[in-house]
Image (cartoon, rainbow, N blue to C red):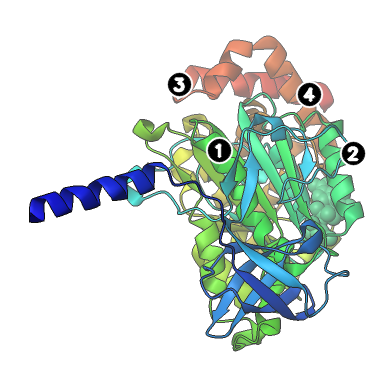
Amino acid sequence: MLQQFLDNTFTTLRGAVTHYSPGLHLREIGTVTYVGGGIARIKGLPSITSEELVQFPDGLLGVAINLEPDEVGVMLLGNSEALAAGVEVSATNRETDTPVGEGLLGRVIDATGRTLDYGKPLSFTERRPVERPAPAIIDRAPVTIPLETGIKVVDALIPIGRGQRELIVGDRQTGKTSVAIDTIINQRDKNMVCIYCAIGQRGTAVARVVDTLRHHNAMAHTIVVVAPGEDPPGLRYITPYAATTMAEYFMEQGMDTLIVYDDLTRHARAYRELSLLLRRPPGREAYPGDIFYIHSRLLERATHLRSNRGGGSLTALPIIETQAQDISAYIPTNLISITDGQIYLSPTLFHKGLLPAIDVGKSVSRVGGKTQLPAFRAVAGDLRLSYSQFEELEDFARFATRLDQDTRTTIEHGRRVREVLKQTEHHPLRPSAQITVLKALNAGLLDDLDLDQIASAETKIQQRMSKECPKLCERMETDHPLNRQEWQTILDVASQVIAGIK
Ligand code: ATP
Ligand code: MG
């Protein structure tokens, strides 16, 4: 009896399920109660989740970031001029996502995939969430391969490895963007995908960067992701996460990627703006309590994956602007503690014309040293020593009237070190060119030249080496240390060139 009843019920239920046709879509509708400053507050939408997209009229989207018992705070991802209180909105059951794929290379886009370069429509492979968990520790490999910037002072003294996070920090107009752009230019023909992520900058500044990259044939391997200063803070806030998702697409296929966040000071300000409007309690410098977390969550996604996960890497170069050289302000200290080192650009050096204005004493790279090529490491040690001795003596020597011969020699040698470490922007050098000239410098061969003869001597030595000893140049760029004979060849070539100049 009971069995028959159960069988009947089961058959009826199965019939109902098989013939069910979804005629009705249930959608939650809410009402806007406040709009302003790039955020909206909404009543209704009781089952919305954090980070879910909200659909406004005219295609405008927002992201739910503040869930309160009777109200939802939403950051808007577009222009809100047409929006007013009383408008109806609906939840979408979708996370914020961004396009990814090879079709993005060479393009200038925003985080939502809107093209900003007046080119053809964007072709992309798929859309992926902008917020993704960072790779697990077990999937990460140590940083072992160098990422060459082509800038002598960085590659020799503050070397960066693939998968590292190196902060570029300095006051305004000290050459921060130039260091990052030169690094992108130097990745031409290296099978590395680069992403330049501009946050809150003026349109003209971004246009200049894109022009520079085009001019140096560096756009083919680069994606430029932009959130201009006039964009709503919500868009400025999600842009670095979206750019990272784009890079991860390539990293997960085993490729090496580099991402520049220019700059995270403006990103932090966008988040502060949103948080204050959403009435979150302000903390130090009026930033909300989770400001450290939003940056660590972003930079944790930079890594070098193990070979069984494809072996790809994501190197991050976040940029931070300081005020009056105060690196102990809230956001710079946060970022310094999150990253694996910093390149500090000094306005004093910039005004003295010592470009790139990198202050070696205040810069450090905590993991990249292990990745340096053996030939490079051999010249870097002596260079660091003579440069720091010189910096110490130089200040002291200004007050001394009579100096002994040793001190004078150290200072004169140091002046030449400083001269060699100067480099004009957008002229990256390959490792062998750098090693050659640094070897000649360490051996004191340049000490007899005048300071203004150094630049031309340097170029001549590099040209002669690459012409006469191409095999040796290649060897310098491998994992093998050079033998005595090979070092001697470099010194012989350099001596001949210098003899010709004197
Ligand atoms: P901002 O704070 O405005 O973003 P920034 O710190 O990013 O500035 P850059 O825009 O990179 O600085 O550089 C400032 C100026 O210095 C630019 O005009 C640039 O051309 C020049 N400059 C930077 N580095 C060098 C260099 N190595 N050689 C010659 N000029 C340089
Ligand atoms: Mg800049």
Q: Position of residue 337 (x, y in %)?
A: 50, 67
* Contact flag, marks 4 and 3 (Cβ < 8 Å): no
Q: Secondary structure at mark 4?
A: helix
Q: Alpha-carbon neighbours of circle 1 within 10 Å: few (<14), some, or many (≥20)?
A: some
Question: Circle 2 sits on which residue?
Answer: 118
- Residue 483 image label: 3
Marks 3 and 1 sit apart, C-alpha to C-alpha, by: 42 Å
Q: What residue lies at 80% left-to-right and 65% top-to-bottom?
A: 172
Q: Quadrant of the C terminus?
A: top right
- Residue 460 image label: 4
Viewer-closest of 429 and 278? 278
Which mark is first along the chain, 1 or 4?
Answer: 1
Q: Secondary structure at mark 3?
A: loop
* Contact flag, marks 4 and 1 (Cβ < 8 Å): no
Which mark is first along the chain, 1 or 2?
Answer: 2
Which mark is first along the chain, 1 or 3?
Answer: 1
Q: Position of residue 204 (x, y in %)?
A: 92, 53
Q: Alpha-carbon neighbours of circle 2 within 10 Å: few (<14), some, or many (≥20)?
A: few
Which of discs 3 and 1 lies nearer the camera? The answer is: 1
Looking at the rendered structure, the kind of residue marked 1 is Tyr
Q: Position of residue 222 (x, y in %)?
A: 71, 36
Q: Position of residue 385 (x, y in %)?
A: 54, 51
Which mark is first along the chain, 3 or 4?
Answer: 4
Q: Secondary structure at mark 2?
A: loop
* Contact flag, marks 2 and 3 (Cβ < 8 Å): no
Q: Would you say the beta carbon of the disc 3 residue lies within 8 angstroms of ligand 1? A: no
Question: Circle 1 sits on which residue?
Answer: 249
